[in-house]
Image (cartoon, coloured by chain):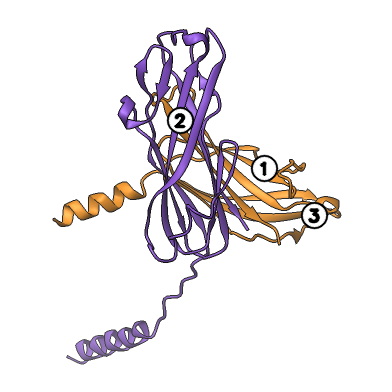
Chain colours: A purple, B orange
Amino acid sequence: MVKQLTLVGMVALSANVSANTAINGNVQSRCIISTDTEGTFGNPNAYTLDTATTNGGELAVTRFDVTLADAYYAQVTAPSAFSSSPSLADVVTWTGDTVVKAVSDSTGMADYETNKIETGYTDKYDLTATGSTWFKTQSKAVMGGSKAFAGGSYTALVVAECIAQ
Amino acid sequence: MYRTVIALLFVGVVNAHEMTPTYPTWKDTHITGVVKTKMEMFNKRKDVDYYEIGVFDKDMKPIAFVSKYDIVKLTYLQHLKFDVYINNNDKSRARYICSKSKIKTDVKVRTAIASRICSKFK
């Protein structure tokens, strides 16, 4: 009986000690780039590859999550060459553009699209609010002289960058 | 319903690349004239196993650095802490430290996404 009481007392004591133990955490500011959708080229005619849905393709979608406002720029660059492809019969002309697809904060992120800076194939956004932003990138490749793309697998890279300010 | 919500949340973050800290600082080492900083990466991209590290000036021109590897293997859901060393003379020029995903050539999709995150020395 004495042993049992002692044991109960020890358990109670240790429970009290445990109850006062704090859990500390430290959250760092960060940027996370997620690949939401890797796009697909449609082939509406022999000499065109296009990610537009109207041409049978699928747009590439990237998501940027930031936990600190005014700390990062997002830069998304549409492709200007194939990273892998069969041999090309002629010069390929590229067009591409990136736009904001969705935002998690419709008030704080409302101006992202209008305030972006476009340089060539690169669109630069100032991430002024915390939260998530989805960007969709359209890309189109047209073979010169209306020559046909040879059969095979074509891959082009969309580059998504998150650069600290 | 719960299963649907959980699945949606998981899909939303399944392919991600992150690097911290946002604003690293250089620290002295035991070697005279060499400074180092510690970075951490986390790979949540299933399609990427390798990342390339680089140190750059304000114009994104490369600066010589030493790390365990320039291209580090980081498999899915793996954390990595690594040190980057540079010459103390380059300390004032070094503005960014970046990690860029390396896309496999056998990727089947037609447009792949390469991600790059750059932390900044202030």
Left or right: where does residue A13 sit relative to residue B4? right
Question: What's the mark number on residue B91?
Answer: 3
The answer to whether dots 2 and 1 both sit on one chain is no
Residue B44 position, x and y percent, is 42, 45
Of residues A10 and B98, the one drawn nearer to the viewer in this rendering: B98
Chain identifier of the residue bearing label 3 in the image: B
Q: Which residue corresponds to mark 1? A: B54
Front in this rendered view, residue A156 or B114: A156
| Mark 3 residue type | Lys
> Can I make out residue B103 in this image?
no
Measure how far apart labels 3 and 2 are at the Cα level.
Answer: 39 Å
Where does label 2 land, which residue? Answer: A139
- Between circles 2 and 1, the one closer to the viewer is 2
Residue A90 coordinates in the image, percent (x, y): 55, 10
- Label 1 SS: strand
Residue at image point 56% right, 36% down: A121
Q: Which one is nearer the viewer's eye here, A129 or B26?
A: A129
Q: Is residue A2 visible?
A: yes
Residue neighbourhood size for the residue with mark 2, other residues' Cα within 10 Å, grouped as few (<14), some (14–19), many (≥20) = many
Look at label 1 and name its amino acid: Gly
Question: Callout 3: 10 Å neighbours few (<14), some, many (20+)?
Answer: some
Q: Position of residue A96 (x, y in %)?
A: 49, 33
Mark 3 or 2: the one toward you? 2
In the rendered structure, the answer to whether residue A3 lies left or right of residue B42 reads left
Q: CA distance from mark 3 to mark 1?
A: 14 Å
Chain of the residue under the numbered disc 1 shown in the image: B
When asked about the image quadrant of residue A104, the answer is bottom left
